[in-house]
């Protein structure tokens, strides 16, 4: 089967940063389903792994997490899907990725593809939807008010992949006032289009802009990017006893002591944790994705797909990785078919 991988960690400008390869087709066993991949999306985690984790002993590592496709075969313990079912999912970081014609994935982290979306539109959603959903409802518990805080949430990086779906989930499932950040006219317009009540400029101090809205201090801050740079503003903006969540890897350290004076709780979200450790509640991601599909099919949220970079091959994936590393991507980048 055709696949795309890498053999050594290199800058994306290298000619062979990603290469086209041929691999044996895997066999579904246990809880695994074998999916014929129809579309994939590219996420920042793809670029981080490529840059920082060289495969051992000259092996080739296949990247790719977000995918949509058709079930071709199922393992002997599978009960949620059958051949012919259309699915979407985000995979797991410690197994071969979805940048291949056929891909094995545990049924418990797979959802039924939204009926109203094509494969490209569906592939844009899983990883960011799981990340946003788990952060908002499992970690921050945004439906549980913070005493004395404004009924509001600040989403830092509102135009990125995770921010784009977080805004929509907040509008669809809560009554919170959504304050998003962006820095360019087009990304500010995007965040507004997705449902943010207010959009502030994160290239300038964020806290004074939030205060100027006159809402009071928000009870929740969801930092999707540059959490180290925005830490001081996050502490200044959030209400005492508020809840702060982050998903990125802060460069140059992250001073948690700054959050102590206001008794702010800090929550990390890692959407691969349930699947990597096969936690007892691993199937919650199956349920979560089905809920997201229902929200899509009832018109409450929409895909965050913004660009399709052509077919799934090394050349197009290199272009997608380069755009993500430029920090200028808006929404999600998808590749379609082999």
Image (tube, helix red, strand yellow):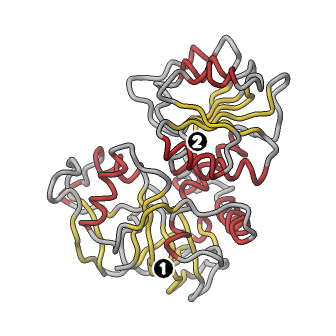
Q: Earlier in the sequence, mark 1 or mark 2?
A: 1
Q: Answer whether labels 1 and 2 touch (C-beta < 8 Å).
A: no
Q: Position of residue 56 (x, y in %)?
A: 24, 54
Answer with left or right where residue 31 lies relative to residue 310.
Answer: right
Q: Position of residue 88 (x, y in %)?
A: 56, 70
- Residue extending farthest to the front is 185
The answer to which of 76 and 307 lies nearer the viewer is: 307
Q: Residue furthest top?
A: 261
- 306 sits left or right of 21 in the view: right
Residue 45: x and y in percent read 41, 50
> Residue at 37% of width from left, 78% of height from top?
101
Few, some or many C-alpha atoms within 10 Å of disc 2 (few <14, some 14-19, many ≥20)? some
**Residue at image x 64%, y 63%?**
302
Between 240 and 23, the residue placed more toward the observer is 240
Mark 1 = which residue? 34
In the image, is 136 to the left or to the right of 41?
right
Residue under numbered circle 2: 269
The image position of residue 332, as x and y in percent, is: 47, 57
Q: Quadrant of residue 179?
A: top right
Q: Is residue 209 above or below residue 22?
A: above
Circle on res. 223: none
- Farthest-out residue, bottom: 84
Considering the numbered disc 1 on the image, is that residue within a helix, a strand or a loop?
Answer: strand
Name the image quarter holding the N terminus: bottom left
Q: Quadrant of the C terminus?
A: bottom left
* SS at mark 2 in the image: loop
| Nearest to the observer: residue 99 or residue 39 | 39
Q: Residues within 10 Å of mark 1 (few under 14, many from 20)?
A: many
Residue at 65 percent of width and 21 percent of height: 237
């Amino acid at each position: 089967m055709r696949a795309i991988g890498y053999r050594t960690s290199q800058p994306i400008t290298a000619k062979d940063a990603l290469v086209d390869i041929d691999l044996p087709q895997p066999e579904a066993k246990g809880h695994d389903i074998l999916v014929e991949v129809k579309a994939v999306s590219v996420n920042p985690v793809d670029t981080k792994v490529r840059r920082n984790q060289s495969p051992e002993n000259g092996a080739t590592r296949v990247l790719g997490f977000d995918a949509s496709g058709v079930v071709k075969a199922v393992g002997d313990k599978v009960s949620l899907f059958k051949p012919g079912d259309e699915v979407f999912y985000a995979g797991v970081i410690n197994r071969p990725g979805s940048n291949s014609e056929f891909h094995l994935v545990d049924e418990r982290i797979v959802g039924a593809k939204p009926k109203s979306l094509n494969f490209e539109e569906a592939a844009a959603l899983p990883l960011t939807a799981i990340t946003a959903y788990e952060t908002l409802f499992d970690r921050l518990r945004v439906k549980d008010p913070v005493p004395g805080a404004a009924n509001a949430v600040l989403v830092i990086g509102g135009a990125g992949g995770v921010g784009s779906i977080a805004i929509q989930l907040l509008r669809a499932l809560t009554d919170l006032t959504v304050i998003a950040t962006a820095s360019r006219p087009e990304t500010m317009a995007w965040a507004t289009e997705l449902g943010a009540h207010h959009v502030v400029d994160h290239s300038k101090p964020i806290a004074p802009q939030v205060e100027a809205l006159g809402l009071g201090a928000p009870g929740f801050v969801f930092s999707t990017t540059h959490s180290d740079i925005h830490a001081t503003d996050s502490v200044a903006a959030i209400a005492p006893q508020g809840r702060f969540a982050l998903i990125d890897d802060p460069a140059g350290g992250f001073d948690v002591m700054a959050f102590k004076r206001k008794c702010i709780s800090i929550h990390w979200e890692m959407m691969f944790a349930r699947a990597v450790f096969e936690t007892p509640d691993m199937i919650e991601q199956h349920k979560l994705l089905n809920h997201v599909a229902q929200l899509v099919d009832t018109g409450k949220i929409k895909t965050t797909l913004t660009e399709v970079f052509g077919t799934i091959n090394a050349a197009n994936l290199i272009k997608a990785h380069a755009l993500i590393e430029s920090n200028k991507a808006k929404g999600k980048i998808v590749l379609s078919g082999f």
